[in-house]
Image (cartoon, rainbow, N blue to C red):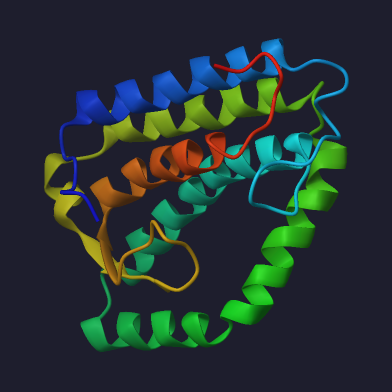
């Protein structure tokens, strides 16, 4: 995993980069692109775009979990992460089918506005974080996502969705994409 980014301006710029890029992707997708299979996943392009948005939605929740669990003894966090890791197979099923279903709710017509709201929420939260909080962290289920580490700080959580986004962006098969 790369070195954690703790510079608030870099984290904020990465959130904005993804927001702008997401709107570009929505704009270049042709009518035939939405249902087309993505590369290396079972999702269609539309489902994968929702899943990319979902990474930012998850980050908002991870921040809440970290604020609670990060204050508990290390053993509690390790145990919590181990329990979640043991449920990886179930998580994978829910992650796949959840994105399939949710793409019907936040489809191509609604996901851009949802992305804006989620990024706005993360930007506001980031702007109000105390510097001392960026080092607070907790253990995570590292088997759930290649961009989860065993231990992640608050700064790592803000950086996580951008890495997840970039990974899946390479799997899109939109005709007008560059």
The residue lying toward the viewer, choosing from 25 and 64, is 25
Q: Is residue 173 above or below residue 146?
A: above
Q: In this view, does 153 lie to the left or right of 57?
A: left
Q: Where is residue 165 in the image (x, y as percent from the top left)?
A: 49, 38
Q: In this view, does 22 lie above or below 1?
A: above
Q: Where is residue 96 in the image (x, y as percent from the top left)?
A: 72, 60
Q: Kindly give the residue lying farthest to the left in the view shown.
A: 132
Residue located at (35% from left, 61% from top) = 66
Q: Where is residue 9 in the image (x, y as percent from the top left)?
A: 22, 23
Q: In which quarter of the image is residue 168?
A: top right
Residue located at (57% from left, 78% from top) = 88
The mark tally for this picture is 0
The quadrant in which the N terminus is found is: bottom left
The residue lying toward the viewer, choosing from 110 and 97, is 97
Q: Is residue 90 above or below residue 32?
A: below
Residue located at (78% from left, 24% from top) = 110
The quadrant in which the C terminus is found is: top right
Q: Is residue 133 left or right of residue 121?
A: left
Q: Quadrant of residue 172?
A: top right
Residue located at (63% from left, 80% from top) = 89
The residue lying toward the viewer, choosing from 149 and 113, is 149
Q: Where is residue 119 in the image (x, y as percent from the top left)?
A: 50, 28
């Amino acid at each position: 995993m790369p070195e954690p980014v703790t510079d608030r301006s870099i984290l904020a710029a990465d959130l904005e980069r993804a927001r702008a890029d997401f709107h570009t992707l929505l704009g270049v997708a042709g009518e035939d692109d939405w249902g087309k299979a993505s590369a290396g996943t079972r999702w269609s392009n539309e489902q994968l775009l929702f899943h990319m948005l979902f990474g930012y939605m998850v980050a908002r929740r991870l921040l809440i979990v970290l604020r609670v669990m990060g204050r508990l003894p290390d053993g509690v966090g390790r145990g919590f992460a181990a329990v979640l890791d043991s449920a990886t197979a179930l998580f994978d099923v829910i992650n796949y089918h959840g994105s399939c279903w949710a793409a019907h709710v936040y489809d191509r017509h609604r996901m851009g506005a949802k992305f804006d709201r989620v990024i706005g929420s993360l930007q506001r939260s980031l702007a109000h974080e105390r510097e001392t909080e960026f080092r607070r962290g907790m253990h995570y289920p590292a088997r759930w996502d290649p961009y989860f580490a065993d231990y992640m700080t608050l700064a790592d959580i803000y950086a996580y969705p951008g890495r997840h986004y970039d990974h899946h962006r390479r799997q899109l098969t939109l005709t007008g994409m560059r």
